[in-house]
Amino acid sequence: DAKTTQPNSMESNEEEPVHLPCNHSTISGTDYIHWYRQLPSQGPEYVIHGLTSNVNNRMASLAIAEDRKSSTLILHRATLRDAAVYYCILRDVLVSNFGNEKLTFGTGTRLTIIP
Amino acid sequence: NAGVTQTPKFQVLKTGQSMTLQCAQDMNHEYMSWYRQDPGMGLRLIHYSVGAGITDQGEVPNGYNVSRSTTEDFPLRLLSAAPSQTSVYFCASSLHSGPTGVNTEAFFGQGTRLTVV
C-alpha cells in the first residue's frame, strides 16, 4: 500500500487559513486521496477526497499537486472547532473485490488553533 | 437518522471476562468495520464485513470475533479479555463502492472506551 507522510503537529491562529500538507510519493494512478479528521473524544469524520483535480466542499478544499505526489488540505478560516487530528489516507479504487473500503490510518497531524 | 451507534460508551472488564461491543447503523450500508485506537496511534483495522454473512480479518484480529447476521448490526466479541485489549474501539460503516466504484465516505461511531484490569 502506498504510504503518506504528515507533520506530527501544526498550530494556527483562529480565523486564519490553515494549510495541512501530505506527502505520498509512491501514490499509484488509481489511489484516491482522502482526508478525515478526529475531534477530541470523537470518532473520525470524513472531510474531503479527490483524485487529480482540486476539490472544494463546505468544510475544506483539497489541492493536489500536478504529479500527485503531495496534497494540501486547506481550511479557509480556522475556528476553535477545527482543532483535531487530521489524517491523509490513500484508497486504491482498484484493490480487488471489497478491499478498497479499508482505511489505513497513520498518526496524522494534530492541529492546534490559537485563539 | 442516527448514523452509527455504539454501545456501551465505557466499559471496565476483568482479565478473562467476555463481552460484546455493539454497533448498529441505520443507513443501509453494506460495509462495516471495527477499529481500535491506542494512545498516540492511528486507528487499526480489526475485522470488517462487506454484507450480511460475510466477514474477514483486518490488521489486528487476534482475540476478537465478529459476525454479521443483519445489514444493520456488526457486534465485536472479546472472548477472554486481556489487558492488551485496553483501547478505544470504533465502528464504521460505508456504502460498498464495488471493485472499481467511486470511493465513498465512511461514517464512524462515537467509540467505546474499554479498560481491562
Image: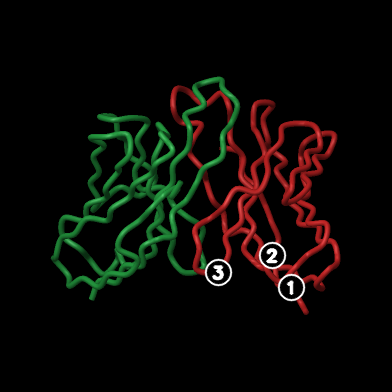
Chain colours: A red, B green
Sequence-wise, the earlier of marks 3 and 1 is 3
Q: Earlier in the sequence, mark 2 or mark 1?
A: 2
Image position of A24 with respect to A11: above or below: above
Q: CA distance from mark 3 to mark 2?
A: 10 Å
Instruction: For marks 2 and 1, give the CA distance.
Output: 7 Å
Give the letter of the chain under mark 3.
Answer: A
Asked whether the residues under the numbered discs 3 and 2 touch, taking CB atoms below 8 Å apart as contact, a structural biologist would say no
Quadrant showing the C terminus of chain B: bottom left
Residue B43 is tagged as none
Residue matched to label 2 = A82
Q: Is residue A60 left or right of residue B112?
A: right
Q: Residue at x 62, y 40 (%)?
A: A90
Chain to which mark 2 belongs: A
Q: Look at the numbered discs 2 and 1 and tell me whether their residues touch, using CB distance below 8 Å.
A: yes
Between residue B71 and residue A83, name the one nearer to us.
B71
Q: Please, what is the three-letter code of the amino acid marked with disc 3?
A: Pro
Q: Secondary structure at mark 3?
A: loop
The amino acid type found where label 2 is placed reads Asp
Q: A14 above or below A1?
A: below
Residue under label 1, please give it: A113
**Taking B78 as reference, is B105 above or below it?**
above
Check disc 3 and report the residue beneath it: A40
